[in-house]
Image: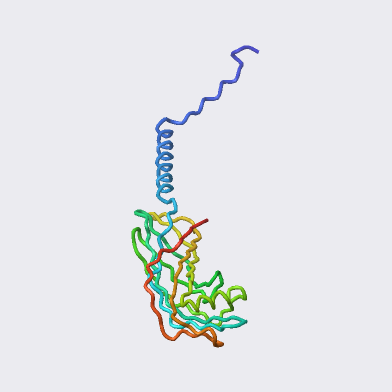
């Protein structure tokens, strides 16, 4: 069979240069946009401060089994320290602890939207009715009451998102740790129950430790 009997070669297929340039341009812009958002959205934790705490009752059984009942109103502020990123707080809860033992019920905060460089203030009431105190922490609490001051930790747990324009991140976990030294005066721990004699309000303006994690 001669050369003239060979089948003709298939025509080559090529993409026009303008199409290639358009695709590459789109990918470049898209990558730059993603990079910009990524750099802007590096999670920067908000700044929490416990402004004041009002203790309306603080009653303790002074022998085993140790029990504590308390009612308090806590004012906590949050500042978004980022200049271009907003924050959405969701499923946030506050409660009080003594030596890592929960002494109030959890209070759920409403979903809150916080613009950049904006302050948000919450003032929830925290109530605890006959919370059990461990045999280890009970004697320490009696000593604190004799000194007239008790260190209570207000804990914050919840989730937040970051937003830039119409873009919203996934949820991050938030943990807050706010120490509050409350001075209750002289409480007689020789009786069966040590009872706070009056309502106490303390101006604290104490920074909280805040951590965020995926």
Task: Please state which of residues 35 and 208 is positioned toward the viewer in this rendering.
Answer: 208
Q: Where 5 sits versus 163, above or below?
A: above
Q: Quadrant of the N terminus?
A: top right
The residue at 48%/65% (across/down) is 177
Residue 11 left/right relative to 76: right
**Residue 167 in the image, given as x and y percentages of width and height:** 42, 54
- Residue 207 on image: x %, y %: 41, 63
**Residue located farthest toward the top when viewing the structure as drawn:** 2
29 vs 10, nearest the viewer = 29
Residue 93 visible (yes or no): no
Residue 115 position by quadrant: bottom left
**Image spot of residue 121 (x, y percent):** 37, 69
For residue 167, say whether it is visible.
Answer: yes
Q: Is residue 112 above or below residue 10?
A: below
Across and down, in percent, residue 212 comes to 48, 58
Q: Is 162 drawn above or below residue 196 in the view shown?
A: above
- Report the residue at 48% width, 82% height from top: 58
Residue 105 located left or right of residue 185? right
Residue drawn at the location 40% of the way across and 42% of the way down = 32
């Amino acid at each position: 069979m001669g050369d003239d009997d060979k089948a003709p070669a298939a025509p080559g297929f090529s993409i026009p240069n303008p199409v290639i340039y358009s695709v590459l341009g789109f990918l470049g812009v898209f990558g730059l946009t993603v990079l910009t958002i990524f750099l802007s959205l590096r999670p920067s934790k908000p700044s929490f401060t416990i402004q004041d705490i009002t203790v309306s009752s603080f009653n303790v059984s002074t022998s085993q089994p140790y029990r504590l009942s308390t009612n308090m109103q806590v004012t906590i502020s949050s500042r978004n320290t980022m200049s271009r990123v907003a924050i959405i707080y969701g499923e946030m809860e506050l409660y009080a602890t003594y030596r890592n033992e929960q002494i109030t019920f959890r209070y759920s905060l409403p979903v809150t939207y916080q613009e950049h460089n904006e302050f948000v203030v919450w003032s929830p009431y925290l109530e605890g009715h006959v919370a059990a105190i461990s045999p280890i922490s009970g004697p320490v609490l009696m000593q604190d009451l004799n000194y007239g001051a008790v260190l209570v930790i207000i804990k914050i747990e919840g989730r937040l998102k970051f937003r830039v324009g119409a873009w919203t991140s996934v949820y991050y976990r938030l943990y807050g740790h706010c120490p509050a030294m409350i001075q209750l005066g002289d409480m007689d721990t020789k009786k069966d129950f040590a009872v706070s004699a009056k309502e106490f309000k303390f101006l604290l303006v104490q920074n909280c430790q805040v951590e965020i994690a995926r």
